[in-house]
Amino acid sequence: MSFLSGLEHIVREGELLAPYTWLQLGGPARYFAEPTNRDELCLLVRRCREEDLPVGLLGGGSNLLVPDQGVPGMVIYLSSAEFARVRVDGPTVVAGGGAKLAHLIATAVREGLGGLEQLVGIPGTVGGALRGNASCHGTDIGQWTQSAAVLTHAGEVADRDGEHLVFGYRESSLDELVILEARFQLEPGDSVELTKRMQKQWIVNKAAQPLQDQRKVMVFRDPGGVGAASLIEQAGLKSARVGGAEVSDRNANYIVAQNEATSQDVLKLIDYLRERVDERLGVELQPSVDMW
């Protein structure tokens, strides 16, 4: 690892990625790094670019499928508190990209700032939520986002705001390598009422997901006007299974991995569901899961 001279303390070789994902599947990363601060992160990315080494960012792992054979490049995991800080600045909240979305929402509600509480129960990090414009019941994180600081693939820090911030359904213009932090402009409100609203929404959202202890992933984007789960059920696929991967009996837009499952099982089941829904209903589902 001569090209990583001075960074040996944050880089490991052959780290198994399965424990970092909700599916608990997948092989090792050739290199796995946990930078402790922004300077180390920028230097690491620049070194990888000089070596033409592919770089991937690992977030909360709730929306990720890692191949059984692993990943050939560098995987960066922002586990340090440096990337997960959440602070309140008047009517705005500033959150690191590595912070849990749940932490951002709870902080805002506690401080009497509304807008994000509808998103409670959505897993993952703030960075992942911004990249995919997390949404629920008519609210998306993009509508509350004022600005963001990002790290490009070239290892340069840049600011994104105004016309540089574009959010659509389950997508955004924030497609750089790392979302370092973001500022959210929220609405002042009563913390007690916001807490009640958040708790009610949490119950509703959790009821539509597989059980907490199950290894699962949400598979498809809703294709507008109708939910992907409903389409899978209409196509008669709620009991579909490939190897150790099966469609959830609580929500057909989730795949659950049993103990014997492999990443290949999940991938084959995703392909099978797409083909059958297209064949039987004429709708082409688009995956929401990030497949490395």
Image (spheres, helix red, strand yellow):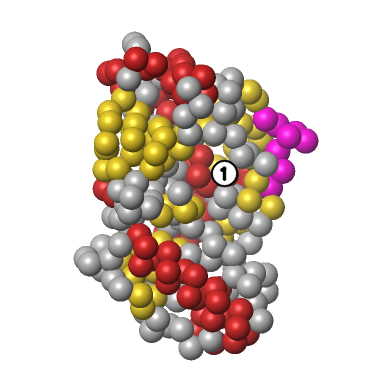
Q: Residue at x 42, y 52 (%)?
A: 64
- Locate residue 188 relative to residue 120 in the image: left or right: right
Q: Is residue 45 visible?
A: no
Q: Position of residue 12 (x, y in %)?
A: 28, 28
> Is residue 169 something one can see in this rendering?
yes
Camera-side residue: 292 or 52? 52
- Write down the residue under mark 1: 130
Where disc 1 sits, the SS reads: helix
Give the residue at x 48% y 22%: 51
| Residue at image coords 50%, 84% | 233
Q: Is residue 124 above or below residue 246?
A: above
Residue 180 at what x, y percent from top left?
52, 29
In the depicted structure, whether residue 242 falls above or below residue 97: below
Number of marks: 1
The answer to whether residue 233 is above or below residue 19 is below
Residue 177 in picture, x, y percent from top left: 54, 33
- What type is the residue that disc 1 sits on? Leu
Closer-to-camera residue (189/36): 36
Q: Is residue 32 magenta?
A: no
Q: Residue at x 48, y 75 (%)?
A: 272
x and y, in percent, of residue 220 in the image: 53, 66
Q: Using the image as rendered, state which of residue 176 and residue 102 is in the foreground.
A: 176
- Residue 261 sits in which quadrant? bottom left
Q: Which residues are magenta?
A: 160-167
Furthest residue in direction top, as rendered? 6
Residue found farthest to the left: 259
